[in-house]
Amino acid sequence: MEVFTKKRRDFGAPVNFSYTEPYLIDSLAPNPELHKLWVERTHRDQQFQTSREMSEHEVNTDRIETISRGIYHKEGGWPKEIDPTESEHVTRYRKKIERDRMYAAALRTLQTTCETIIKQNNAVEINEKYFDSAEESEVQSDESDVPTLKSLTVLRDPNGSPEDHDGRWARKVVWRHEGAQKSRKVAISYCSLDFDKRLSVDIGGYGSHNCSSYIWDITNPNFPEQELSATAPITCLEYHTKDTNLMLGGWYNGMLSLWDTRKGHRPVDTTDIKMSHSDAVLDLKWIKSKSGMECASVGADGRVLWWDVRKFSSPIDTMEVRLPAWALAGRNRPGAKRSSRGSARPGARGAAGTTAAEEKPVAPLLGTMCIDYDSAAGLNKFTIGTETGHICLCNSKGRTPSERISAVFHGQHGAISSLYRSPFYPKFFLTSGDWSVRLFHEEVGTPILASKYAESRVVDCNWSPVRPGVFASAQANGYVDIWDLVRRTTHSVLSTKVSEHALTCCSFDHSGNLLAVGDEKGGLTICEVSKSLSNIGSNEKHAVQSVLDREQKREKNLESRMKESRLGKTTAKVEDSVVADLAKEEEEVERLFLESIVGAHGSL
């Protein structure tokens, strides 16, 4: 080791450079042996993480159940000799206190304090929202173009749990009508229509099954507001159109009941089981009438029953759902030609010269899955969806079974799970089933719009009551699709997963701001719809009407072209048959002529 020493005063002295001639210090000759060991390596990239690796994990905390309890306040502070329940004793004691000298001084002290607080409250409004307009403009700017669905709360079946494999479905959900405001109360019918569970119920009865359904207040998701008790599972519910205290329900055993929420949880009247449906009631609707107390119900037994709830002893009318002869022949309407796209007016004569009234239904009963009624489409008109995928347009005033069914559409490849007419355009109705959603016009035999096949079965659909082009559909894989015909018609504008379980129903509230989605484990998820899906545009009705009219004309043009092509083929077939007959006749004449000539030569 060498040590270099230098005095402190010499540090920092200027450096003196001088010029010298270059000279060789050392020379290293190349080594061929080392060249043989040289290995060329290609370019190589390697990634590495300098920060600490961490994983993201989300946890849902346990739900806190709260209970609202009332407190009884009892007036106290009275001397023992004074009975506060006796007005004379109280009056006498108050007069005694008012005559006391300290009473006036205490009032003056309290008056000064109260006056200061009142002035502060008048100067500053603690409950006033100063930035409502700014918040609303910010929300509108953020949500004007991006449709979203926000989950608010989940209402669970009080008699089940998500881990319960035998839990009840939230099969039908109906909102209570509260005007233009957001609905707060919702009624849910809990019933499982799974085949295995239905078989166990049919064999074992309802003794071990809870059959109650509930009315909820969405602001209190912990406990239902009211119970609707029954002796059989309730498959469907429907609020009265005007009196929201009346609730109509259909049972699993085919009976119907009427509840008045002001009179408790028990039904005020129930139909006779001998006069009711012979299978489960799957859907029901209130019907516009003079009394306002009539309704119609459909069931899996293939019948439609009309009732007057003031007299539940027997139905006022009955209709069996069967395909008429003209429908079995492949025609869409009476008198139409055999075609899936054909259409004709009811009552027109067919090829055999028979009218709809003369044709008799020969098909078996069809199980009815759903019914829709809208007085705007006709006071006596209603639409039925069957388990075979057929949609029947019916008239309750028809005299014969064939007159009651005016048109039949092949709607889906499976059972029609739901059917709803548009609240803005009554001639258009929406259906769901198999793996798609389809939009029909009652004068066109085929759907004017149809969605692409989804990955899972579509179980329900529902129109928005405020936006004419918006509707929702629920799938069995837990996803909800929101459609907006103004934006696009080929696919949905929003698809989001709402539940880990299969969905069973969906319904918009009357304000269009909330969407309720039920699943097969008894849960009902309340979702808030974004402003872009709940606020109607200035010219939206006209825009949606133009879209629907365009698709309707397109389908009609396709039908007319199909008719022309079939007519051309039929004419060509007739001409070919005539030519073949003439050829056969010529061959026969020539054969007879030759036989006559041969016979003449033989006689000679």
Image (cartoon, rainbow, N blue to C red):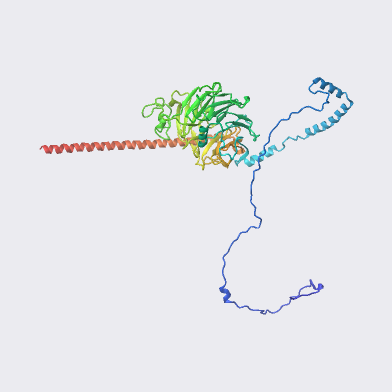
Which residue is at 64% across, 31% downward? 225
From what the image shows, is residue 404 above or below residue 524?
above
Residue 386 place in picture, x, y as percent = 47, 32
Count of numbered tags: 0
Outermost residue, right side: 101
Residue 486 in view: no
Residue 313 place in picture, x, y as percent = 52, 21
From what the image shows, is residue 32 above or below residue 191?
below
- Image quarter where the C terminus lies is top left
Residue 449 in view: yes
Outermost residue, top side: 88
Which residue is at 18% across, 37% downward? 593
Side of 114 where 54 appears, left or right: left
Q: Which of 155 and 135 is in front in this view?
A: 155
Residue 370 place in picture, x, y as percent = 51, 31
- Image quarter where the N terminus lies is bottom right
From what the image shows, is residue 2 above or below residue 469?
below
Outermost residue, left side: 604
Q: Nearer the viewer, residue 75 or 460?
A: 75
The quadrant in which residue 445 appears is top left
Residue 103 place in picture, x, y as percent = 87, 27
The quadrant in which residue 597 appears is top left
Q: Which of 32 and 556 is in front in this view?
A: 32
